[in-house]
Image (tube, grey):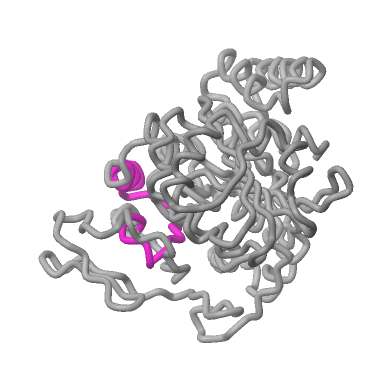
Amino acid sequence: MAGNTEPLSPRAKLAVTAGKAAAAVSRAAGRGSGSVIGGRVALKLDPDLLGRLAQHLDVILVSATNGKTTTTRLIAEALGAAGPVVSNALGANMPAGITSALAGGSDAKFGVIEVDEKYLAGVARDTTPKAIALLNLSRDQLDRAAETRMMAEHWREGLSGSKAVIIANADDPLVVWAASSSPNVVWVAAGQAWKDDAWSCPSCGGVMQRPGEDWFCGQCGFRRPAPSWALNGDYVLDPHGSAWPIHLQLPGRANKANATSSAAVAAVFGVPPQVALERMYQVQAVAGRYDVVTFQNRELRLLLAKNPAGWLETFSLIDPPPTPVILSVNARGADGTDTSWLWDVDYTQLAGHPIFVLGDRKLDLAVRLEVAGLDFRVCESLDEAVQYSPPGRIEVIANYTAFQDLRRRVGN
């Protein structure tokens, strides 16, 4: 349980040391941060290590299809006002990566942990969190992730009776269904731009009625709960009805929603909204997301979008036409090898932008854009795409491994 400061056993210490050594070797070999391999080695030596590392921390878990890395960073920044924080800031969000992150937090008070949706119940069981933030659920990585209704049910079963405070998005019916099995829920009106995975009731399968921002099932009565926190334009409304201005360096409505949920989490630990939101202003980019870099004497803004809901949010924040847009899509293991999700994205929103297409699956994307009636150019490299782009800042949108490829190419 958090607050227990019992020292690590010799076996656990050995596992931590071996994990750090494996991570260092991985970094020296140029194979990334080493956090995943380090965690795997450590857990092999002590399978209970994650729970041992979490026992002295107030743990906060963050899970969602989209926005969990950014929200984790915002919460960590806010809670820094109340004590030292350890966090998996680079987004390694499965047990091995989480274990690596916590191994570096022996002096921390808070552990703010992003968790892959599939692993949430297990990580919650191991770490005994004080709070869990649930942001959204939508289709993603169709070849490895469960169907969204199944994922909501998995969360619901895994979190049933949890002693954690659940901070949940009242605007997402799947999240509400998942969180409703818990006795202590703080509801946040964070919005839901992508609704295509939430037209049937997760409780009975009936058709969801969605008048305005409200929603309810006409058959079983399952409905949107009354939120105690809400995003209202550029303000966070707290449970007392006070409005606190949101000042972020991160763009878009989705990040204001992330900030709203983060403020609600911070309040659980006694950090006032004003303090939490002021601290969030320090965040300029998150693991390369939203970074503006110079490449070949051009400004590029790097944006990550991994699934239809993420692409929808990203289209809403790019500069208007005729701003050039580079799109890059891969289908490696970390992305999901099934690219059928491309057909769920409304690419017609890019009409008027000069479009350049890259990545391992550039031809899949080219077919999708052709059907959408858009003009585009297929390129072999980022260098070629930049060379042919008209003047002005270039918006670069990529899915997960394509994004990492681009960051390496621009030296970010």
For residue 51, say whether it is visible. Answer: no
For residue 288, say whether it is visible. Answer: yes
Of residues 376 and 134, the one nearer the viewer is 376
Residue 214 to residue 338: above or below: below
Can residue 205 be found in the magenta stretch? no
Outermost residue on the left side: it is 219
User: Residue 236 at what x, y percent from top left?
Assistant: 57, 77
Residue appearing at x 71%, y 15% in the figure: 18
User: Residue 360 at what x, y percent from top left?
Assistant: 57, 28
- Stretch of the chain drawn in magenta: 151-175
Residue appearing at x 50%, y 39% in the figure: 365
Of residues 375 and 190, the one nearer the viewer is 375
Residue 241 to residue 381: above or below: below
- In the rendered image, the quadrant that contains the C terminus is top right
Q: Viewed as shown, does residue 280 lie left or right of 338?
A: right
Of residues 155 and 200, the one nearer the viewer is 200
User: Residue 350 at what x, y percent from top left?
Assistant: 55, 58
Residue 33 to residue 355: above or below: above
Of residues 164 and 303, the one nearer the viewer is 303
Can residue 167 be found in the magenta stretch? yes
Residue appearing at x 46%, y 56% in the figure: 135
Residue appearing at x 50%, y 47% in the figure: 129
User: Which of the 4 quarters of the picture holds residue 31?
Assistant: top right
Q: Viewed as shown, does residue 183 lie left or right of 379?
A: left
> How many marks on residues?
0
User: Which of the 4 quarters of the picture holds residue 71?
Assistant: bottom right
